[in-house]
Image: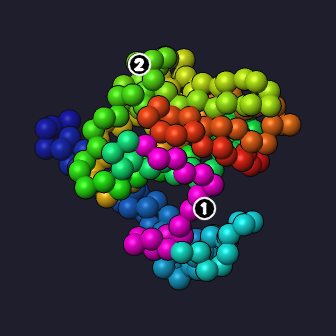
Protein backbone atom coordinates (compact mmCIF):
# COMPACT_ATOMS: atom_id res chain seq x y z
CA UNK A 1 0.00 0.00 0.00
CA UNK A 2 1.41 3.36 -0.92
CA UNK A 3 1.80 6.28 1.48
CA UNK A 4 -1.01 8.13 -0.31
CA UNK A 5 -3.55 5.32 0.29
CA UNK A 6 -2.52 5.01 3.97
CA UNK A 7 -3.18 8.72 4.55
CA UNK A 8 -6.61 8.45 2.86
CA UNK A 9 -7.57 5.44 5.02
CA UNK A 10 -6.46 7.14 8.24
CA UNK A 11 -8.26 10.38 7.30
CA UNK A 12 -11.43 8.40 6.54
CA UNK A 13 -11.23 6.58 9.87
CA UNK A 14 -10.83 9.89 11.69
CA UNK A 15 -13.91 11.34 9.93
CA UNK A 16 -15.97 8.27 10.91
CA UNK A 17 -14.78 8.48 14.54
CA UNK A 18 -15.55 12.21 14.83
CA UNK A 19 -18.96 11.74 13.17
CA UNK A 20 -19.80 8.92 15.58
CA UNK A 21 -18.78 11.04 18.56
CA UNK A 22 -20.86 13.99 17.36
CA UNK A 23 -23.86 11.69 16.87
CA UNK A 24 -23.44 10.23 20.38
CA UNK A 25 -23.20 13.68 21.95
CA UNK A 26 -26.28 14.89 20.07
CA UNK A 27 -28.19 11.97 21.58
CA UNK A 28 -27.30 13.17 25.09
CA UNK A 29 -28.85 16.61 24.66
CA UNK A 30 -32.47 15.76 25.40
CA UNK A 31 -34.29 14.02 28.18
CA UNK A 32 -35.86 10.59 28.30
CA UNK A 33 -39.18 12.02 27.13
CA UNK A 34 -37.88 13.01 23.67
CA UNK A 35 -38.01 16.76 24.40
CA UNK A 36 -34.86 18.84 24.03
CA UNK A 37 -33.12 19.75 27.27
CA UNK A 38 -34.28 23.37 27.08
CA UNK A 39 -37.95 22.31 26.99
CA UNK A 40 -37.80 20.13 30.08
CA UNK A 41 -39.08 21.56 33.33
CA UNK A 42 -36.84 21.85 36.34
CA UNK A 43 -38.45 21.81 39.75
CA UNK A 44 -37.10 23.92 42.57
CA UNK A 45 -36.01 22.05 45.71
CA UNK A 46 -38.82 21.71 48.22
CA UNK A 47 -38.26 23.07 51.73
CA UNK A 48 -37.53 20.50 54.40
CA UNK A 49 -39.25 20.31 57.76
CA UNK A 50 -38.61 23.46 59.73
CA UNK A 51 -38.11 25.65 56.63
CA UNK A 52 -40.76 27.93 55.24
CA UNK A 53 -41.65 28.55 51.60
CA UNK A 54 -40.50 32.15 52.07
CA UNK A 55 -36.92 31.31 53.12
CA UNK A 56 -34.63 34.31 52.95
CA UNK A 57 -32.28 34.36 49.98
CA UNK A 58 -28.69 35.55 49.79
CA UNK A 59 -27.23 37.57 46.89
CA UNK A 60 -26.76 34.43 44.77
CA UNK A 61 -30.48 33.65 45.01
CA UNK A 62 -30.16 30.43 47.01
CA UNK A 63 -32.19 29.88 50.15
CA UNK A 64 -30.46 30.88 53.37
CA UNK A 65 -29.44 27.92 55.52
CA UNK A 66 -30.91 27.43 58.97
CA UNK A 67 -28.46 28.34 61.74
CA UNK A 68 -28.72 25.96 64.71
CA UNK A 69 -25.86 27.49 66.74
CA UNK A 70 -23.33 30.30 66.69
CA UNK A 71 -20.04 30.82 68.49
CA UNK A 72 -17.85 33.92 68.68
CA UNK A 73 -14.14 33.74 67.95
CA UNK A 74 -11.27 36.18 67.97
CA UNK A 75 -10.97 39.34 65.84
CA UNK A 76 -14.57 39.33 64.62
CA UNK A 77 -14.72 35.68 63.54
CA UNK A 78 -18.09 33.96 63.96
CA UNK A 79 -18.82 30.23 63.60
CA UNK A 80 -22.33 29.44 62.36
CA UNK A 81 -23.40 25.80 62.49
CA UNK A 82 -26.14 24.80 60.05
CA UNK A 83 -26.44 21.07 60.63
CA UNK A 84 -25.24 18.09 62.64
CA UNK A 85 -26.53 15.05 60.75
CA UNK A 86 -26.10 11.34 61.35
CA UNK A 87 -25.03 9.45 58.23
CA UNK A 88 -25.84 5.82 57.39
CA UNK A 89 -22.28 4.61 58.00
CA UNK A 90 -22.17 5.59 61.67
CA UNK A 91 -20.77 9.08 61.12
CA UNK A 92 -21.91 12.50 62.28
CA UNK A 93 -21.25 15.37 59.87
CA UNK A 94 -21.26 18.92 61.22
CA UNK A 95 -21.47 21.68 58.61
CA UNK A 96 -21.60 25.44 58.75
CA UNK A 97 -19.72 28.64 57.93
CA UNK A 98 -16.81 30.59 59.33
CA UNK A 99 -17.62 34.30 58.88
CA UNK A 100 -15.19 37.17 59.15
CA UNK A 101 -17.23 40.13 60.42
CA UNK A 102 -14.06 42.18 60.98
CA UNK A 103 -12.60 44.93 58.80
CA UNK A 104 -9.33 43.05 58.08
CA UNK A 105 -8.49 39.68 56.56
CA UNK A 106 -8.19 36.93 59.19
CA UNK A 107 -5.02 34.83 58.92
CA UNK A 108 -4.66 33.20 62.36
CA UNK A 109 -6.14 29.84 61.37
CA UNK A 110 -3.31 27.55 62.55
CA UNK A 111 -4.97 26.86 65.92
CA UNK A 112 -8.05 25.44 64.18
CA UNK A 113 -6.13 22.40 62.96
CA UNK A 114 -5.36 21.28 66.52
CA UNK A 115 -2.40 19.12 67.50
CA UNK A 116 -3.71 15.71 66.44
CA UNK A 117 -3.91 15.99 62.65
CA UNK A 118 -1.15 18.38 61.64
CA UNK A 119 -0.64 16.39 58.41
CA UNK A 120 -3.90 17.85 57.10
CA UNK A 121 -2.35 21.31 56.90
CA UNK A 122 -4.47 24.35 57.63
CA UNK A 123 -7.88 22.87 58.41
CA UNK A 124 -10.61 22.56 61.03
CA UNK A 125 -9.21 19.22 62.26
CA UNK A 126 -8.98 20.58 65.81
CA UNK A 127 -12.77 20.47 66.17
CA UNK A 128 -14.24 18.13 68.78
CA UNK A 129 -17.67 17.01 69.92
CA UNK A 130 -18.46 16.43 73.58
CA UNK A 131 -21.31 14.15 74.64
CA UNK A 132 -21.84 15.42 78.17
CA UNK A 133 -24.49 12.81 79.01
CA UNK A 134 -22.27 9.96 77.80
CA UNK A 135 -19.12 11.63 79.19
CA UNK A 136 -17.24 11.14 75.93
CA UNK A 137 -15.23 13.37 73.56
CA UNK A 138 -15.14 12.71 69.79
CA UNK A 139 -12.34 13.82 67.45
CA UNK A 140 -12.48 14.46 63.70
CA UNK A 141 -12.14 11.25 61.68
CA UNK A 142 -9.14 10.62 59.42
CA UNK A 143 -8.70 8.80 56.14
CA UNK A 144 -6.27 5.91 55.61
CA UNK A 145 -3.43 8.37 54.95
CA UNK A 146 -4.00 10.25 58.22
CA UNK A 147 -5.72 13.32 56.72
CA UNK A 148 -8.82 14.71 58.38
CA UNK A 149 -12.32 14.20 57.04
CA UNK A 150 -12.93 17.91 57.27
CA UNK A 151 -12.42 21.19 55.44
CA UNK A 152 -8.75 21.78 54.58
CA UNK A 153 -6.83 24.65 52.98
CA UNK A 154 -8.16 27.15 55.52
CA UNK A 155 -5.36 29.73 55.68
CA UNK A 156 -7.19 33.05 55.35
CA UNK A 157 -10.72 34.47 55.37
CA UNK A 158 -11.17 37.90 53.81
CA UNK A 159 -12.91 40.75 55.60
CA UNK A 160 -16.67 40.37 55.27
CA UNK A 161 -16.32 36.90 53.70
CA UNK A 162 -17.59 33.48 54.75
CA UNK A 163 -16.08 30.02 54.28
CA UNK A 164 -18.26 26.88 54.27
CA UNK A 165 -16.83 24.14 56.48
CA UNK A 166 -17.59 20.56 57.50
CA UNK A 167 -16.13 17.99 59.87
CA UNK A 168 -16.98 14.27 60.23
CA UNK A 169 -16.97 12.51 63.58
CA UNK A 170 -17.88 9.04 64.85
CA UNK A 171 -21.59 9.21 65.65
CA UNK A 172 -22.53 9.19 69.32
CA UNK A 173 -25.15 6.62 70.43
CA UNK A 174 -28.63 7.24 69.01
CA UNK A 175 -29.82 8.11 72.52
CA UNK A 176 -27.59 11.20 72.37
CA UNK A 177 -29.53 14.04 70.73
CA UNK A 178 -27.36 16.99 71.74
CA UNK A 179 -23.59 17.56 71.75
CA UNK A 180 -21.21 20.42 72.37
CA UNK A 181 -19.14 21.51 69.35
CA UNK A 182 -15.70 22.99 70.02
CA UNK A 183 -13.28 24.61 67.59
CA UNK A 184 -10.09 26.17 69.02
CA UNK A 185 -10.32 29.96 69.57
CA UNK A 186 -14.17 29.86 69.49
CA UNK A 187 -16.64 29.60 72.33
CA UNK A 188 -18.38 26.22 72.68
CA UNK A 189 -21.72 25.74 70.92
CA UNK A 190 -24.44 23.26 71.90
CA UNK A 191 -26.01 21.64 68.81
CA UNK A 192 -28.90 19.26 68.24
CA UNK A 193 -28.29 16.14 66.14
CA UNK A 194 -30.62 15.37 63.25
CA UNK A 195 -31.08 12.17 61.28
Q: Position of residue 162 (x, y in %)?
A: 39, 54
Q: Earlier in the sequence, mark 1 or mark 2?
A: 1
SS for dot 1: loop
* Residue beneath disc 2: 118
Residue positioned most to the right: 175
Looking at this view, is 9 or 89 the one in front? 89
Sort mark 2 into few (<14), some (14-19) or many (20+) by Cα contacts within 10 Å: some
Task: Identify the colour scheme used.
Answer: rainbow
The part of the image, by quadrant, that contains residue 47 is bottom right
Q: Which residues are magenta?
A: 57-73
Mark 1: few/some/many CA within 10 Å (<14, 14-19, 20+): some
> Which residue does the image show at 51% across and 34% down from the upper left?
183
**Is 126 positioned to the left or the right of 15 in the image?**
right
Vertical placement of residue 172 versus 33, above or below: above
Q: Does any portion of residue 167 appear in the rendered image?
A: no
Nearest the viewer among 41 and 49 is 49
**48 above or below 78?**
below
Image disc number at residue 66: 1
Image coords of residue 56 (percent x, y): 54, 75
Instruction: Name the side, left or right, on which 9 lies relative to 24.
Output: left
Outermost residue toward the bottom in this view: 39
Amino acid sequence: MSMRHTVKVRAGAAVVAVSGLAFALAGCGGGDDGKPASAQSVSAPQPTAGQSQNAASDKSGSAAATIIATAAGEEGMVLEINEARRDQGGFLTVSGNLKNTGAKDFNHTTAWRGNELTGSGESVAGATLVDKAGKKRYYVLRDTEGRCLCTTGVNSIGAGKALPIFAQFPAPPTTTTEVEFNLPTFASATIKISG
